[in-house]
Image (cartoon, rainbow, N blue to C red):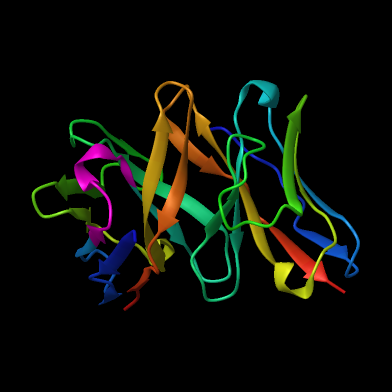
Amino acid sequence: SYVLTQPPSVSVAPGKTARITCGGYNFGSRTVHWYQQKPGQAPVVVMYYDTDRPSGIPERFSGSNSGNTATLTISRVEAGDEADYYCQVWDSSTDHRVFGGGTKLTVL
Amino acid sequence: EVQLLESGGGLVQPGGSLRLSCAASGFTFSLYAMNWVRQAPGKGLEWVSTIRSSGDNTFYADSVRGRFTISRDNSKNTLFLQMDSLRAEDTAVYYCAKEVTIFRSTAYFDYWGQGTLVSVSS
């Protein structure tokens, strides 16, 4: 089955930029989606189709996908951004949905 | 407002069965694929199963294929997950999630329920 790889943790100071990566084999042809999950809450989509931001998600959140890596970038990080972030793709060979292992974002 | 409300979780012994339900409202349920996604305690998200809008096509993670059955009742706007031969490793919060599907291109989850906890233990 298809595997997505994320760093387990990323730490950033308030006001700085956080970059969370997601990689996989032959990744460039796949469209990536990102979810934010805060403790005790359900996940919320923060980026879809690589670069599209749902309404209500701050412009500080942006996405990119190039080569074998997709990146969720959070600019001017705030304490409220502290959460687990998951990338997700659709695997065309199996019609399965696949999540990365998740990245815990810590705001120092 | 889209709402997804899961129910049916609880404590069950290994080898037992449980049926989860997800009541949907705020959108035309019959037009959208639906999913179950689970999260074991302290772990990440794991996709479990998808059912297409009409119910004619279903897909399962390897970890649950042959033991779990996803179904839906479009007349009652309800999604189900029948879980049989449960194992300790099935212990998780189970989320129901509405899907946005671009045929043969991609799929993602735009709305999630709050989840229901399934505990498998003797």
Magenta span has B31?
A: yes
Residue A31: image x %, image y %?
Answer: 60, 30
Q: Residue at x 59, y 75 (%)?
A: A39
Q: How many marks?
A: 0
Residue B102 in sight here: yes
Q: Residue at x 40, y 33 (%)?
A: B101
> Going by the image, does A103 lie left or right of B26?
right
Residue projecting furthest to the left: B75
Residue A24: image x %, image y %?
Answer: 69, 32
Q: Residue at x 18, y 37 (%)?
A: B55
> Which quadrant of the figure contains the N terminus of chain B?
bottom left
**Is B112 in front, or is B40?**
B112
> Which quadrant of the figure contains the C terminus of chain B?
bottom left
**Is B12 in front, or is B30?**
B30
Q: Quadrant of residue B24?
A: bottom left
Q: Quadrant of residue B99?
A: top left
Q: Residue at x 91, y 61 (%)?
A: A16
Residue B61 in sight here: no
Residue A35: image x %, image y %?
Answer: 59, 53
Magenta span has B84?
A: no
Residue B53: image x %, image y %?
Answer: 24, 37
Task: Tell me where the magenta segment starts and ends, as one range.
Answer: B23-34
Q: Quadrant of residue B26?
A: bottom left
